[in-house]
C-alpha cells in the first residue's frame, strides 16, 4: 500500500444508540505513518455447496455472519467481507447472500470470489451490491479490500439494512463503483 496515496482520515461505521452511524477514522499519524487502529477487519466467509442449505433464504440462518456484523459495528469501523463461493462464479447459498446483503447495507463492502481455480471469474453482473473479485483468490481479495477501505472508507449504511430506501441503495451502488474500479485493475 502506498501510504502517500491514502487520506489522513475516512468515514467508518459504528452502531451507536441502536443506530448505525458514520464515524471518522484516522488513517495516518501526523508523520504520515499508518495508525494501527486504521487497519480494517476483513473476514473471509467460505461457502461449501454440498452442505445442507436453509432453503428459505433467511439471513437469520447465518448466525456466524450476523454475529460478525454486530461485532464489527461495535469494534471495527472499517470492516468488510470476502465471500469465497463455489466455482465457477463464486455462487453462495440464498441465506449467505441475504446475510452478506445485510453486511453491505450496514456499511461493510463484500467481495465475491470463486474457490480455487475458478474457471468462471466473478463478474459484476452476477453480484448485485457486491464487488466482483474476478479471478482473485480470497486472500488477495482480502488485502485489496483492506487497502480500499483505508482509501475510500466504509459504504454508506442504510438506516434499516433489512429495508433500505431506493436512495440508500443508490448511494451504496455509487460507492461500490469506486471499489469495483480498483478491483477491475487487479
Image (spheres, grey):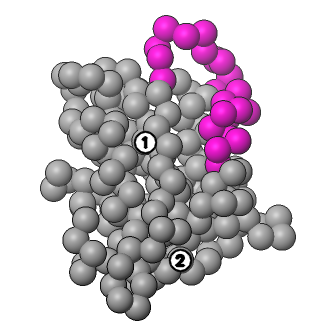
Classify residue 115 as left or right of residue 85. left
Please report the residue visible at 38 percent of the width from the left and 39 percent of the height from the top: 112
Marks 1/2: CA–CA distance? 21 Å
The answer to whether residue 114 is left or right of residue 79 is left
Residue named by callout 1 = 82
Residue 139 lies, in percent from the top left, at: 33, 39
Callout 2 crowding tier (Cα within 10 Å): few <14, some 14–19, many ≥20: many
The range drawn in magenta is 47-69
Q: Which residue is identified by label 2?
A: 25
Q: Position of residue 156 (x, y in %)?
A: 54, 68
Query: In what element is the residue under mark 1?
Result: strand
Q: Residue at x 27, y 35 (%)?
A: 137
Question: Which of the 4 image quadrants contains residue 158?
Answer: bottom right
Check if mark 1's residue and mark 2's residue have beta carbons within 8 Å: no
Task: Tell me the number on the disc at residue 34.
Answer: none
Q: Residue at x 60, y 15 (%)?
A: 53
Q: Nearer the viewer, residue 185 or 143?
A: 143
Amino acid at each position: 500500500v502506498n501510504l502517500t496515496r491514502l487520506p489522513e482520515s475516512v468515514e467508518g461505521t459504528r452502531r451507536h444508540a441502536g443506530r448505525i452511524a458514520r464515524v471518522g477514522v484516522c488513517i495516518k499519524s501526523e508523520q504520515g505513518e499508518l495508525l494501527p487502529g486504521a487497519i480494517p477487519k476483513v473476514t473471509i466467509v467460505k461457502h461449501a455447496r454440498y452442505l445442507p442449505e436453509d432453503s428459505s433464504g433467511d439471513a437469520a440462518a447465518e448466525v456466524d455472519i450476523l454475529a460478525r456484523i454486530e461485532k464489527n459495528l461495535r469494534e471495527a469501523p472499517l470492516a468488510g467481507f470476502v465471500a469465497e463461493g463455489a466455482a465457477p462464479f463464486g455462487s453462495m447459498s440464498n441465506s449467505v447472500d441475504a446475510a452478506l446483503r445485510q453486511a453491505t447495507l450496514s456499511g461493510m463492502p463484500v467481495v465475491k470470489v470463486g474457490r480455487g481455480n475458478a474457471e468462471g471469474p466473478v463478474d459484476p453482473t452476477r453480484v448485485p451490491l457486491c464487488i466482483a473479485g474476478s479471478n482473485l483468490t480470497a486472500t488477495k481479495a482480502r488485502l485489496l479490500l483492506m487497502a480500499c477501505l483505508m482509501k475510500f472508507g466504509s459504504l454508506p449504511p442504510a438506516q434499516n439494512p433489512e429495508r433500505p430506501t431506493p436512495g440508500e441503495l443508490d448511494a451504496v451502488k455509487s460507492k461500490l463503483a469506486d471499489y469495483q474500479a480498483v478491483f477491475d485493475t487487479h
